[in-house]
Amino acid sequence: MIPNAIDINADVGEGVGNESQLMPFISSCNIACGGHAGDKETMRSVIKLAKEHRVKIGAHPSFPDKENFGRVTMEMSCTALFKSIIGQINDLMHILKEEHRALHHIKPHGALYNLAAVDERIANIIIEVMKALVLPVKLYVPFGSVVEKLAISHNIPIIYEAFADRNYNDDLTLVSRKNKLASIDNEDLLFDHIFNMISNQKVKTITGKDIEIKAQTFCIHGDNPNAVNLIKNLGKRLKTHGIQIR
C-alpha cells in the first residue's frame, strides 16, 4: 500500500547556503552542529528558517573533522567520541532553547553514520548518546543496520531512513563516493529510485537486484549541487501520485 505522506529530509548548515531554497520543499532537516561543518551563527540562522517553514529539526553530529567534512573515519576513544557528539548536540540544543524550538531527531553524518550501520562499537556510542539525552528524541537509522538493532534493544525510538540521491550496494550499504555511480543526479532516475522504495519497499542496487528496504524518511543531501531542483521536482511528481511531503 502506497502511503499518502512521507518525510523528506536534507542535511543543512554545511556552508552551501541554499537553506532558504530547500526549506519550502522538505519536512525535516539535519543541522550540522560544528563537527564537520557549521558554527553557532549558522545553526541559529538555519533554525530560524526551519521555524519559519515548520520543518522538524534534527542534530547532525559527526566526527570532529572539518578538514575532511566528516567523511573520513577518525581513530578516537569511545569516551572522546562520545564527548564530541554530545557537545555538538548540546550546542545546537542551547540555540534551540533560545529560539523556542524542540529537537526532533538525531542523524549522524558521513563516516560516523556509515560506521554505525556496520560497526558495533561506534553504534554503541550512538546509543549511549541517545540515552544520555533523556529526551523523546528519535534516531534516524538505515534499515537492517547494527545501530537499528541496538536502538530497538535499548528502546530508543527510531525512524528508518533511506537516501533518495545515493545508490546502494547489495548489503544496503551506500556505494562509495569514490565510485562515479555513487550519487543520483538525474531527476527521472531519482524519482524511480525513491518511488520503488515507497511503493514496493524495495531498492534497486548497483548490481540491478531488488532488495527489501524500509524507509519513513528520505534524504537528499543539501550539498548536492542540484539539490534544490531535485527536491522541487520530486515533490511535484510525488503529489501526482497522491503523496504529500510532511
Image (spheres, rainbow, N blue to C red):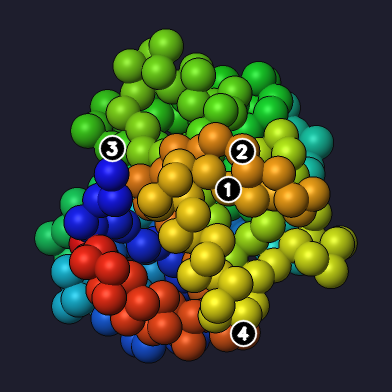
Name the mark on residue 105.
Answer: none
Q: Residues within 10 Å of mark 4 (few under 14, many from 20)?
A: few
The quadrant of the image that shows the N terminus is top left
**Of callouts 2 and 3, the N-terminal one:** 3
**Of callouts 3 and 1, the N-terminal one:** 3
* Image height of 187 relative to 67, above or below: below
**Of callouts 2 and 1, the N-terminal one:** 1
Pointers 2 and 1 in contact (CB under 8 A)?
yes
Name the mark on residue 137.
Answer: 3
**Of callouts 4 and 1, the N-terminal one:** 1
Q: Is residue 236 visible?
A: yes
The residue depicted at 70 percent of the width and 25 percent of the height is 119
For mark 4, give the secondary structure: loop
The residue depicted at 29 percent of the width and 50 percent of the height is 2
The residue depicted at 35 percent of the width and 23 percent of the height is 156
Instruction: Give whichever of 190, 227 is nearer the camera.
Output: 190
The image position of residue 212, as x and y in percent, is 55, 35
Q: CA distance from mark 4 to mark 1?
A: 24 Å
On the image, numbered disc 2 is attached to which residue? 211
Pointers 3 and 1 in contact (CB under 8 A)?
no
Q: CA distance from mark 3 to mark 1?
A: 27 Å
On the image, numbered disc 1 is attached to which residue? 203
Name the mark on residue 225.
Answer: 4
* Image height of 215 relative to 195, above or below: above
Q: Residues within 10 Å of mark 3 (few under 14, many from 20)?
A: some
- Marks 2, 3: nearer the viewer: 2
Asked which quadrant contains residue 155, the reply is top left
Q: CA distance from mark 2 to mark 4?
A: 28 Å
What amino acid does circle 3 point to? Val
Q: CA distance from mark 2 to mark 3?
A: 29 Å
